[in-house]
């Protein structure tokens, strides 16, 4: 029955200009696992990477997203339970971030002060835009 369907977002395609450079950024600097790196033929290669603990992966590649320009994806968002630790890890790994920003007031009296309203923003090497948000009771 249609009402019983589970809709699961599993893959987001991120256009990049240099696969090796992007693979190193996502795996070494962000800590994403390389699920597979598949060369289909000389014109097509697909690399799938997954953030720790996530059920949604990122795909980068050649010959797989012809209508997307590198750096045009904005608003990708990761959620973590501890934004301060995530920010520290990103900084230690050389990722240029916005620093921790608080956007609005926390709607919960019992939650950590950064829950829901704490963010760190960064871009990959092509300018694709990412946010990291703290939601301690949902992440991890």
Image: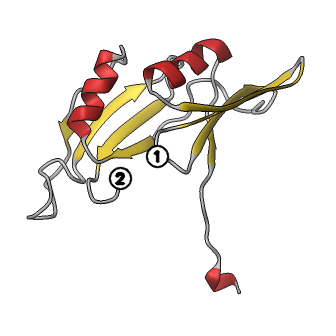
Q: Position of residue 53 (x, y in %)?
A: 46, 46
Residue 21 in view? yes
Residue furthest out toward the left: 109
Give the left or right position of residue 15, taking residue 125 as reference: right
Circles 1 and 2: CB distance less than 8 Å?
Answer: yes
Q: Position of residue 65 (x, y in %)?
A: 75, 33
Residue at (26, 53) in percent of width and height? 136
In the image, is residue 124 above or below residue 20?
below
Residue at (51, 28) in percent of width and height? 128
Per the model, the C-alpha gap separating discs 1 and 2 is 8 Å
Towards the viewer: 99 or 24: 24
Q: Which mark is residue 139?
A: 2
State the image quarter where residue 105 is shown: bottom left
Residue at (48, 22) in percent of width and height? 124
In the image, is residue 30 above or below residue 9?
above
| Element carrying mark 2 | loop
Residue at (54, 19) in percent of width and height? 126
Residue furthest out toward the right: 41
Give the left or right position of residue 25, taking residue 43 as reference: left
**What residue is disc 1 on?**
53
Task: Indicate how the structure is coloured in the image.
Answer: secondary structure
- Please tell me how many numbered marks the rendered image carries: 2
Give the left or right position of residue 71, taking residue 1 as reference: left
Q: Position of residue 5 (x, y in %)?
A: 65, 76
| Element carrying mark 1 | loop
Quick one: label 2, few (<14), some, or many (20+) residues within 10 Å? some
């Amino acid at each position: 029955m249609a009402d019983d369907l589970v809709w699961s977002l599993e893959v987001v395609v991120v256009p990049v200009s240099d696969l090796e450079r992007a693979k190193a950024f996502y795996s070494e600097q962000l800590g994403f696992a390389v699920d597979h790196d598949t060369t289909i033929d000389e014109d097509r290669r697909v690399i799938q990477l997954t953030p720790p603990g996530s059920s949604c992966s990122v795909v980068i590649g050649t010959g797989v997203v012809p209508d997307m320009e590198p750096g045009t994806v904005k608003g990708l968002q990761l959620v973590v339970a501890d934004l301060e630790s995530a920010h520290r890890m990103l900084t230690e790994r050389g990722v240029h971030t916005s620093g921790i920003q608080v956007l609005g007031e926390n709607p919960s009296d019992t939650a950590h002060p950064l829950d829901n309203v704490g963010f760190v923003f960064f871009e990959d090497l092509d300018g694709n835009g990412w946010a990291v948000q703290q939601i301690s009771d949902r992440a991890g």
